[in-house]
Structures are given as C-alpha cells and as structure tokens.
Image (spheres, rainbow, N blue to C red):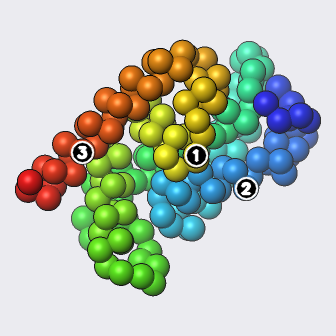
Amino acid sequence: MQEGIPTTTVPGEIERMFEECHGMVFRTAYRITGNAADAEDVLQGVFLRLLRRDRSAEPLENPESYLRRAAVNASLDVVRARQESAGVALEEAPPGPADQRELRDLLRRALATLSPRAAELFALRFFEGYSNPEIARMLGISQVHVAVLLHRTRKQLQKEVRTYLGV
C-alpha cells in the first residue's frame, strides 16, 4: 500500500486517493481498452463507485490494490460492451502497421471471454508488469496459485486466438 492512502472513504480522503492514484487507474484502463476516452470513463467510474461506497462498509485494506482491480474489471466491462456493440471499434487506431492493431483487437476480444479473475491476473502480470509474488500479495493468494491461474489463462487465450484465426 502506498503511504498516505487512507483506508476509509470519506470525500476528503477520496480526493487524496484520486490525487495519488488517478494516473495508475488511467494507465491500467488505457492498457486494457486501448482508448484514452474509454480510460477516462473508467477512471471516473472507479472513483464514483468509491465515492458511493457505503460508509458503513469495512475500510479498504489496500486502497491502491482495490483501485487497480476496479480499473481492470471496469476496463474489461468496456471491452465486452464494445464487442457486443456492432459497428463500434475496439480502439482508436494509432498510427502503425495494421497487423499490430488487429493483434491488439484480437487480444482484447479474447480477454473479454475470460472470467473476471483470470482477466485481472493476466492484466496485472502482462499489462501492468507485476511479478507473480507481487500479484499474490495484492490478491492474498499463493504464488503457486497465481502461476497456475496464469498458465491456464494463457492456454485459454491461445485457444481463443486460434479459434478466431481458424487455426
């Protein structure tokens, strides 16, 4: 947990959390959605959800981890919604080879088929760059469990990509 991040959710504390963590939430969302506008929407949604959180609920044990996980899950919801909406691109196409854009689109579509937990682990490991031990600490599970889940998730993503490519 970052120092200075409070563990309760009153408006002044949420403002401090926003100041300290908004960049991390935006980057997490952008890596998953591939779209700055969607990442902004996720950022706003995550903090609105935190603001609306029941004051009688238990204080957040690790606010940074909570915000990162909320950003991953909200981003995946955006990708899934885009996938269901015909005629809406999954991302604004940045300059570069079309093959790379297609590959990113394919990966996003495949991620949208995963369970929330599997997608979260994959995003933390391969988009955010956290190590297995770091993820285990964040999520309160063993390193072995993280490794097994990531292995299964990669296999499932490979299967989804092969199905899409007709291989």
| Residue bearing the label numbered 3 | 158
Tag 1: amino acid: Gly
| Gap between marks 1 and 3 measured at Cα | 20 Å
Mark linked to residue 101: none
Residue 164 shown left or right of residue 14 in the figure: left
Residue 105 x/y as whole percent: 33, 63
Tag 3: amino acid: Gln
Query: Who's the residue at 46% across and 79% down the image?
Result: 94
* Secondary structure type for disc 1: loop
Q: Nearer the viewer, residue 152 or 4?
A: 152
Query: Who's the residue at 48% across and 24% down the image?
Result: 146
Looking at marks 1 and 2 on the same chain, the residue that comes earlier in the sequence is marked by: 2
Q: Is residue 48 visible?
A: no
Q: Nearer the viewer, residue 8 or 139?
A: 139
Tag 2: amino acid: Gly
| Gap between marks 1 and 2 measured at Cα | 16 Å
| Residue bearing the label numbered 2 | 23
Please count the marks in the image: 3
Q: Nearer the viewer, residue 101 or 4?
A: 101
Mark linked to residue 129: 1
Label 1 or label 2, whichever lies nearer to me, is: 1
Query: Who's the residue at 35% across and 31% down the image?
Result: 151
Looking at marks 2 and 3 on the same chain, the residue that comes earlier in the sequence is marked by: 2
Asked whether the beta carbons under mark 1 and mark 2 sit within 8 Å of each other, the answer is no
